[in-house]
Amino acid sequence: EDKVVQSPLSLVVHEGDTVTLNCSYEVTNFRSLLWYKQEKKAPTFLFMLTSSGIEKKSGRLSSILDKKELFSILNITATQTGDSAIYLCAFGGSQGNLIFGKGTKLSVKP
Amino acid sequence: DTGVSQDPRHKITKRGQNVTFRCDPISEHNRLYWYRQTLGQGPEFLTYFQNEAQLEKSRLLSDRFSAERPKGSFSTLEIQRTEQGDSAMYLCASSLQATSGSYEQYFGPGTRLTVT
């Protein structure tokens, strides 16, 4: 059965810290890996990764995929209180649906 | 606003009643997905449409659940004879169909269902 595992499940940091969120997967028919940010509402798209070793970057956020070791990381540098959210990792299956992990709850303290 | 919209945003119903939710996708997107999310979990896939055709249903979708997308635009999700275990956030997402098989799904604000 396809599975996506995120770690840690929760994390508390202070403003200015750098954090790394982990996502590992065991899936068949890999197509893509996606990261979403969820505050008190629906998930907001961050990145989609399909190729190993190519970093995607948006401001203070960056992500990379390792298809050999079956994991991805999401880095956030110089964290701000507005980064507090649940970060979801999802695998894009061949049937079109997304399979999500449980998420990492990030809390950034001022 | 050209994003995904859902209606209603909140629904409180009594056990045994039927409820229907609506989703309007991003207009140029031909794929539409329904997910369910409970506290502490990521969204769980329920079903998806490509245009008006329902192509995939999760085993989570019991026979009390039915979804339609009659004209390939908006979609409805109906739950009959609601149970307390149906209480959750119901999320709709849409995407383009990508020939490479890779696609970004954009989510609506969700409908939060509470069954009392």
Image: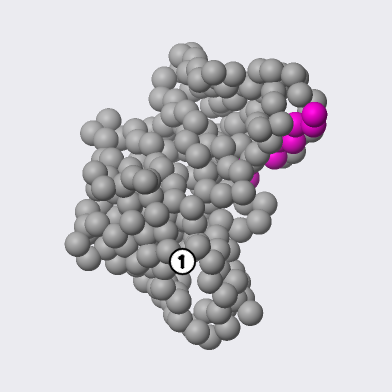
| Residue linked to disc 1 | B8
Q: How many marks?
A: 1
Q: Quadrant of residue A11?
A: top right
* Viewer-proximal residue among B35 and B21: B21
**Residue at 58 percent of width and 83 percent of height:** B14
Residue A76 in view in this figure: yes
Q: Is residue B29 left or right of residue A64?
A: left
Where is the C terminus of chain B found, in terms of image quarters? bottom right
Helix, strand, or loop for circle 1? loop
Task: Provide the chain ID for the residue under circle 1.
Answer: B
Residue B75: give x, y in percent of width and height. 32, 62
Q: Is residue B67 left or right of residue A15?
A: left
- Whether residue A103 appears in magenta in the rendering, the answer is yes
**Residue at 35 percent of width and 36 percent of height:** B103
Q: Quadrant of residue B101?
A: top left
* Viewer-proximal residue among A39 and B67: A39
Specify the amino acid type for callout 1: Pro
State the extent of the magenta-drawn residues as a range: A102-110
Q: Chief secondary structure of the magenta span?
A: strand
Mark 1 surroundings within 10 Å by alpha-carbon count, few (fewer than 14), some (14 through 19), many (20 or more): some
Residue A70: give x, y in percent of width and height. 54, 26
Residue B55 in view in this figure: no
Q: In the displayed structure, would residue A22 be above or below residue B10?
A: above
* Viewer-proximal residue among A2 and A18: A18
- Whether residue A15 appears in magenta in the rendering, the answer is no
